[in-house]
């Protein structure tokens, strides 16, 4: 990065959970980015944290000539139309996951970004979680040999249904749209696009309106990758479990950065992203070996995104990758509804986006 350049001015659209917890503090922690405007209907909430930044007119924020980058962290059904408006206004755009409501919307945004020659990216911050970085490191070292079985869980214990749009009927709501994009993105980074997708989904909580349990199996020849998310897991579920020809790996607990942000810890503060929960490597002996887990740092997404906008680095999460995540997400929904395996609707160009990422 060239420190002599003025910072890129950023407009954040939405100040709900994602905008307040993740985007605002991460943007503010990265040099070369300036959070200049926050568009929200809840002006008092924004003003309490970020005085002087709030506007209630989304279009005014998007079309502000001083804004270079628009970050969309509003409800899922607004992602595609707001991204479209921002690209038409000549802005670079970050969209919180999910990229869109369906593959068709996602492909339209890719085409528009290419015509406008603007950076379009999706916020897959969990690529920089400590647990995933640890698993990726072990796979790169070849400790497990040929990996045949992988389980990736993001489980929570929230037995009470809350009155928020993610848990109520509406387009893009439900646990699979919320956590599925993270689980899929990590799996595709490790193994590429699956041949077929099997899925089962359910509403398990009393009073639940939308999916709050999802179990998805990605098929890669003999390999199976299980993606699982539930809201009635109080404990005992490992974040990652992998079995291979030379051994097994278990990562018991997940990354701490979300909890740190909720506790008011600023990104980059002492202890940020550190993970003292070791990975357990089993090679068939009596006792497992304990492998240190590398620190996570979700700031890396915005560092790389900044450099991509400046033209000095590649896009950290390309729109073609985001389209493919949507294709697998849709395939899982179709499988759960139809009771059969589904082949993801992915073009050759979209598939190649993951081959490049794996290099």
Image (spheres, grey):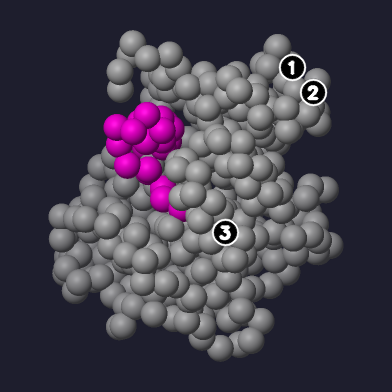
CB atoms of marks 2 and 3 within 8 Å: no
Query: On the image, numbered disc 2 is attached to which residue?
Result: 43
The picture places residue 278, in percent across and down from the top left corner, at 31, 45
When asked about the image quadrant of residue 10, the answer is: top right
Q: Nearer the viewer, residue 215 or 45?
A: 45
Q: Is residue 245 left or right of residue 65?
A: left
Q: Which residues are magenta?
A: 296-319
Counting labels gives: 3
The picture places residue 104, in percent across and down from the top left corner, at 59, 66
Name the residue: 61% across, 42% down: 88
CB atoms of marks 2 and 1 within 8 Å: yes
Considering every residue shown, the one lying at the far front of the view is 115
When asked about the image quadrant of residue 100, the answer is: bottom right
Query: On the image, numbered disc 1 is attached to which residue?
Result: 47
Element marked by disc 1: helix
Name the residue: 61% across, 27% down: 11
Residue 108: image tag? 3
Element marked by disc 3: helix
Q: Is residue 74 left or right of residue 98?
A: right
The picture places residue 343, in percent across and down from the top left corner, at 47, 81
């Amino acid at each position: 990065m060239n420190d002599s350049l003025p910072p890129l001015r950023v407009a954040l659209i939405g100040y709900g959970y994602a905008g307040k917890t993740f985007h605002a503090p991460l943007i503010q922690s990265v040099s070369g980015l300036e959070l200049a405007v926050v568009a929200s209907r809840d002006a008092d909430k924004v003003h309490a944290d970020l005085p002087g930044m709030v506007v209630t007119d989304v279009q005014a924020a998007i079309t502000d000539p001083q804004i270079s980058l628009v970050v969309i962290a509003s409800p899922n059904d607004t992602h595609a139309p707001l991204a479209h408006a921002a690209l038409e206004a000549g802005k670079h755009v970050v969209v919180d996951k999910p990229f869109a409501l369906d593959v068709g919307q996602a492909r339209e945004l890719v085409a528009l970004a290419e015509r406008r020659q603007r950076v379009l990216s999706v916020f897959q911050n969990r690529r920089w979680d400590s647990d995933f970085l640890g698993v990726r490191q072990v796979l790169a070292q070849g400790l497990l040999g040929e990996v045949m079985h992988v389980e990736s869980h993001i489980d929570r214990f929230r037995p009470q249904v809350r009155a928020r749009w993610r848990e109520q009927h509406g387009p893009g709501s439900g646990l699979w749209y919320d956590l599925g994009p993270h689980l899929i993105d990590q799996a595709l980074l490790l193994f590429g696009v699956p041949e077929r997708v099997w899925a089962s989904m359910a509403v398990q909580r009393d009073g639940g309106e939308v999916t709050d349990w999802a179990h998805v199996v990605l098929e890669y020849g003999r390999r199976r990758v299980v993606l699982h998310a539930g809201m009635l897991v109080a404990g005992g579920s490992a974040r990652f479990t992998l079995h291979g020809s030379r051994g097994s790996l278990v990562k018991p607990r997940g990354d701490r950065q979300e909890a740190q942000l909720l506790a008011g810890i600023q990104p980059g503060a002492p202890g940020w992203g550190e993970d003292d929960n070791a990975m357990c490597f089993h090679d068939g002996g009596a006792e497992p070996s304990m492998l240190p887990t590398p620190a996570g740092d979700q700031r890396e997404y915005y560092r790389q995104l900044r450099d991509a906008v400046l033209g000095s680095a590649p896009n950290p999460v390309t729109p073609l990758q985001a389209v493919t995540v949507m294709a697998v997400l849709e395939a899982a929904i179709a499988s759960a509804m139809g009771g059969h395996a589904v082949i993801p609707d992915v073009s050759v160009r979209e598939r190649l986006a993951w081959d490049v990422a794996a290099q």
